[in-house]
């Protein structure tokens, strides 16, 4: 019985990975997306970092957090509605895997894309600006968990029961920009008023930014373990509305 | 004989329970192991809705589905492993090649690594797609996509295969190839659930057929026995001049005609035997010095078969009172059936 459970777990993980690889091939490894992946960090850098008079380290820490945030959910929210429209999503829903497995596979693609893109951003930061990374392992852990959390956040919108990717665009964009402005990215947490800071603590981006500060600059405001824990927990928590909306979709017939 | 699928009181209401669309209305049936079970009904009958519930894609509003002995709502995993699904629209990944499409599905169903390639090759060769294995599915014709979609559904050798209208829109040759394939799979032991709106297809392929309309099953029987019902609802359509509208009752009284129904400027006469009714209509026209503007025979329409089986009047739309319409004469015995 236990063996059966282990076998099932192995199967489910392999299936999640199969979904990840398939999505990667079908949606991400395409000229447009690759271009986007290369250009995004530069956009981020020039629009949010350079104009302000700040140290290169600080710029890179911010660049990493923002690149993770904007690329992890760049395509994810639109893939499921599109697959629902094309009927290919039925294939995944009817396959012998749990809904959670499917969602994990879908989350992993966005996360991998974000990790790839921010690694590129990191290389540019290190090579072009000679930035030193204070705590490399924290950086790796932060990139993985941040990418996971943001990708899972994007998947909530992908789980809206609809066949029209356009329906997803507005809410997902609104939320992302909303989070961007309440998070401690442009104004550091230390400089925020009590209310603003309370608001900032809601957003996972705040913790990703703090973690990047630890990793790149060597110091942040919060405990890095708290940052890591919050990113992991928020990622898991974000799967819950996705599961619920998928259940609703199964009732409505999407 | 064991049942592969048992369906009890299966119901789907889209929207609110009180006011929504009842797509499937308390149906009961079972699919026996090893048979080709046809699910026959006109557009909007509830076929796809039923099939989506049977394949776990849609949550029933009410009722129970037991497949391979597992209650689908609580224990879907072992069922999903043994189930293959060919949906209404060929849902292949257009960005992937035929080969990659098959490999993806094989991995999803955990087909042994050693077996994947040989199985994919065998299928592609059987389906005439081997030469196209490295072509992306976006460059495939409709028929090729359909074949690929079927290949993807059976790469893990499912014990139960669902097909939702696999042949419409294909040329005669592709259609026949798919029907042959269904027969072959069935001969190898696969239980088949085939959704269709083509009487002839059901007739050729199925061991038993359920007839569904407006979400309800009117009859479940062998094609041969259902055919008896089909026979009774063949018809002859005639337009007469002048004053063609006046002859309905007289036409219905002709020997061999069971009912007459006015269809625009024509009268449709239902009959078991159009070939003997035709000359009688001509004789009638000659006798009354009428000009025959058009005259044609029609095979049974599914709607008519459904009405025939449920004992309702043919030629009328359901839920609409047959006001001022000629009464049905003759056959009214019901087929043994489904509810
Ligand atoms: N997701 C949905 N939401 C609301 N109504 C739906 C939905 N899906 C189907 N219906 C309705 O349910 C009824 C049955 O539809 P279904 O697709 O099952 O018919 P069908 O027998 O497969 O027809 P066809 O031959 O056209 O494929 C129709 O009235 C349809 O409008
Ligand atoms: Mg249908």
Image (cartoon, coloured by chain):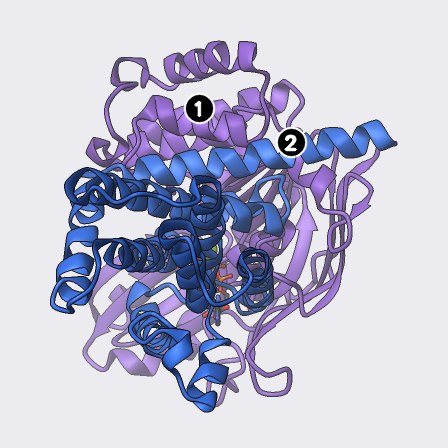
SS under mark 2: helix
| Residue drawn at (66%, 64%) of the image | B60
- Read off the residue under disc 1: B103
Q: Which chain is blue?
A: A
In the visual, does B125 lie left or right of A254?
A: left
Q: Position of residue B158 (x, y in %)?
A: 62, 28
Front in this rendered view, residue B316 or A230: A230
Badge 1 local density, few (<14 within 10 Å), some, or many (20+)? many
Front in this rendered view, residue B124 or B285: B124
| Residue drawn at (39%, 83%) of the image | A192
- Read off the residue under disc 2: A11
- Residue B103 appears in which quarter of the rendering? top left
Say if labels 1 and 2 share a chain.
Answer: no
Label 1 chain ID: B
Drawn colour of chain B?
Answer: purple
User: What is the number of the mark on residue B4?
Assistant: none
| Residue drawn at (36%, 50%) of the image | A216
- Work out whether A156 lies above or below B272: below
């Amino acid at each position: 019985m236990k063996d059966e459970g282990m076998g099932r777990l192995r199967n489910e993980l392999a299936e999640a990975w199969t979904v990840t690889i398939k999505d990667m091939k079908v949606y991400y490894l395409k000229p447009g997306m690759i271009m986007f992946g290369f250009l995004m960090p530069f956009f981020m850098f020039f629009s949010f970092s350079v104009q302000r008079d700040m140290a290169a380290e600080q710029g890179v820490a911010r660049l990493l957090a923002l690149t993770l945030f904007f690329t992890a959910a760049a395509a994810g929210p639109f893939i499921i509605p599109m697959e629902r429209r094309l009927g290919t999503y039925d294939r995944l829903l009817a396959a012998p895997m749990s809904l959670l497995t499917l969602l994990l596979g879908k989350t992993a693609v966005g996360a991998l894309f974000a990790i790839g893109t921010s690694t590129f951003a990191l290389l540019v930061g290190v090579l072009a600006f000679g930035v030193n990374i204070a705590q490399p392992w924290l950086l790796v852990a932060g990139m993985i968990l941040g990418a996971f959390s943001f990708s899972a956040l994007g998947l909530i919108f992908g789980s809206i029961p609809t066949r029209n990717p356009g329906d997803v665009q507005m809410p997902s964009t609104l939320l992302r920009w909303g989070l961007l402005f309440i998070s401690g990215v442009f104004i550091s947490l230390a400089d925020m008023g009590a209310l603003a800071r309370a608001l900032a603590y809601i957003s996972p981006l705040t913790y990703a930014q703090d973690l990047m500060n630890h990793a790149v600059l060597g110091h942040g405001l919060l405990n890095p373990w708290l940052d890591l824990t919050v990113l992991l927990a928020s990622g898991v928590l974000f799967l819950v509305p996705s599961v619920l909306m998928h259940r609703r979709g199964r009732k409505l017939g999407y | 004989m064991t049942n592969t699928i048992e369906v009890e009181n299966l119901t789907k209401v889209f929207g609110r329970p009180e006011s929504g669309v009842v797509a499937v209305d308390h149906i009961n049936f079972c699919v026996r192991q090893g048979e080709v079970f046809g699910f026959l009904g006109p557009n909007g009958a509830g076929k796809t809705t039923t099939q989506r519930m049977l394949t776990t894609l849609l949550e029933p509003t009410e009722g129970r589905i037991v497949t391979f002995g597992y209650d689908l709502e609580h224990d879907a995993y072992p069922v999903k492993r043994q189930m293959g699904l060919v949906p209404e629209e060929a849902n292949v990944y257009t960005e992937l090649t035929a080969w990659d499409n098959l490999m993806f599905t094989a991995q999803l169903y955990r087909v042994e690594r050693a077996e994947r390639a040989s199985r994919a090759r065998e299928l592609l060769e059987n389906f005439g797609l081997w030469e196209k294995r490295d072509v992306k599915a976006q460059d495939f014709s409709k028929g090729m996509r359909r074949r690929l979609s079927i290949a993807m559904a059976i790469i893990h050798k499912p014990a139960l295969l669902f097909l939702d209208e696999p042949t419409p829109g294909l040329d005669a040759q592709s259609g026949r190839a798919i029907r042959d394939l269904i027969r072959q799979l069935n001969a190898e032991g696969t239980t088949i659930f085939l959704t269709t709106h083509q009487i002839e297809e059901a007739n050729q392929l199925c061991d038993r057929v359920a007839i569904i309309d407006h979400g309800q099953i009117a009859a479940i029987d062998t094609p041969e026995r259902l055919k008896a019902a089909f026979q009774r609802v063949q018809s002859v359509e005639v337009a007469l001049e002048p004053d063609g509208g006046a002859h309905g009752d007289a036409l219905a009284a002709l020997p061999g005609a069971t009912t007459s129904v006015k269809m625009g400027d024509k009268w449709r006469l239902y009959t078991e035997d159009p070939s003997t009714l035709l000359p009688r209509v001509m004789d009638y026209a000659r006798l009354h010095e009428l000009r025959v503007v058009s005259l044609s025979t029609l095979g049974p329409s599914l709607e008519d078969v459904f009405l025939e089986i449920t004992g309702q009047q043919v030629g009328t739309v359901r839920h609409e009172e047959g006001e001022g319409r000629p009464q049905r004469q003759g056959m009214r015995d019901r087929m043994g059936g489904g509810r």
